Every structure is written in structure tokens, then in C-alpha cells.
């Protein structure tokens, strides 16, 4: 919304002006002194910095450092410089659990058809044929 931009800018300028007049060394009043605060104008008590770029997540516009702002990044927490989205679901391939869009996990449980009988030995999860039961296998 175009009307919200001036309000956000005014709020930012108010913080900057407050910073100039601040005497306690903690402009955002989060309890972290400005000289060690990685996001001095926005309260960020935990100082979380996921990408390790020295800018706190509360004021970091590119959390995964792939040169795409978080708002337009289809994988804001995983670097995805190509922004490839193979299935067109809005989630980049770099962080999509279903890249092909078939609503199936990339891992499938091995299945087989067997005619006859299988004998399970007591206290052993494997059959005499050596087939492992209940173990997912990657495709």
C-alpha cells in the first residue's frame, strides 16, 4: 500500500532521531547496548543472526545472503540464487520437500509382490529372504 510507506519511513526517522537524542546507549530499549547490538534500531533481545552476516534477523532484509530480499525470495532461509521453482508452487527447489509437485515425499517405502509364504524368526525384524521390513528406502 502506497500510504503505508510514508508511515513506515516516518517511524524509522523517529527512531533515528531518538537515537541521536538517546543517552543510555540502547536506542531500541531491548536491554542490549548499541555497541554490541546487531540490530540497534529494532528490538532484538536474542541477537539471532541466522546467516552470520553481522546483521540481526529482526532487521536483515536477506537472511540467506543470496541477493534476493526476504519478501521476494522463494526460499528466504536457504540460499537459492537461481530462484528455480520446478513445480510452480511458489517454494524454491532449494527448500521444497516436493520438487516435482506430486504430493509425495522424495522417500518411498520399498514395496514388493511375493507369492508364497515368508517365515519370520522370533525377535528378528528380517525375514529368511533377507528383506528388511519397515525400513524406508530412498528412491
Image (tube, rainbow, N blue to C red):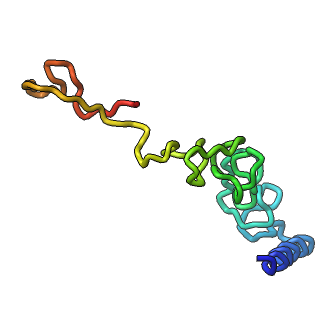
Q: Nearer the viewer, residue 117 or 136?
A: 117
Residue drawn at x 82%, y 77% as measured from the top left: 11
Residue drawn at x 77%, y 59% as measured from the top left: 39
Report x, y in % for residue 138. 40, 31
Number of marks: 0
Q: Which quadrant holds the N terminus?
A: bottom right
Residue 102 relative to residue 48: left or right = left
Residue 77 relative to residue 129: left or right = right
Image quadrant in which you'd find residue 36: bottom right
In the displayed structure, 59 sits above or below 122; it is below
Residue 5 relative to residue 139: left or right = right
Residue drawn at x 68%, y 45% as measured from the top left: 83
Q: Nearer the viewer, residue 35 or 120?
A: 120
User: Residue furthest toward the top?
Assistant: 129
In the displayed structure, 92 sits above or below 71; it is above
Report x, y in % for residue 44. 69, 63
Residue drawn at x 8%, y 27% as measured from the top left: 122
Residue 124 relative to residue 69: left or right = left
Q: Which quadrant holds the C terminus?
A: top left
Image quadrant in which you'd find residue 37: bottom right
In the displayed structure, 8 sits above or below 104; it is below
Report x, y in % for residue 102. 44, 46
Report x, y in % for residue 123. 12, 28
In the displayed structure, 48 sits above or below 25; it is above
Amino acid at each position: 500500500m502506497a500510504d503505508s510507506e510514508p508511515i513506515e519511513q516516518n517511524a524509522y526517522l523517529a527512531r533515528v532521531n531518538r537515537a541521536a537524542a538517546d543517552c543510555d546507549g540502547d536506542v531500541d530499549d531491548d536491554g542490549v547496548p548499541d555497541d554490541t547490538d546487531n540490530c540497534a534500531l529494532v528490538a532484538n533481545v536474542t541477537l539471532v543472526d541466522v546467516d552470520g552476516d553481522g546483521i540481526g534477523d529482526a532487521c536483515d532484509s536477506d537472511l540467506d545472503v543470496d541477493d534476493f530480499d526476504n519478501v521476494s525470495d522463494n526460499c528466504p532461509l536457504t540460499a537459492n540464487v537461481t530462484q528455480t521453482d520446478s513445480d510452480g508452487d511458489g517454494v524454491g527447489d532449494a527448500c521444497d520437500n516436493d520438487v516435482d509437485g506430486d504430493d509425495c515425499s522424495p522417500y518411498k517405502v520399498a514395496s514388493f509382490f511375493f507369492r508364497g509364504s515368508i517365515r519370520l524368526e522370533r525377535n528378528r525384524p528380517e525375514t529368511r529372504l533377507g528383506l528388511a521390513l519397515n525400513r524406508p528406502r530412498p528412491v
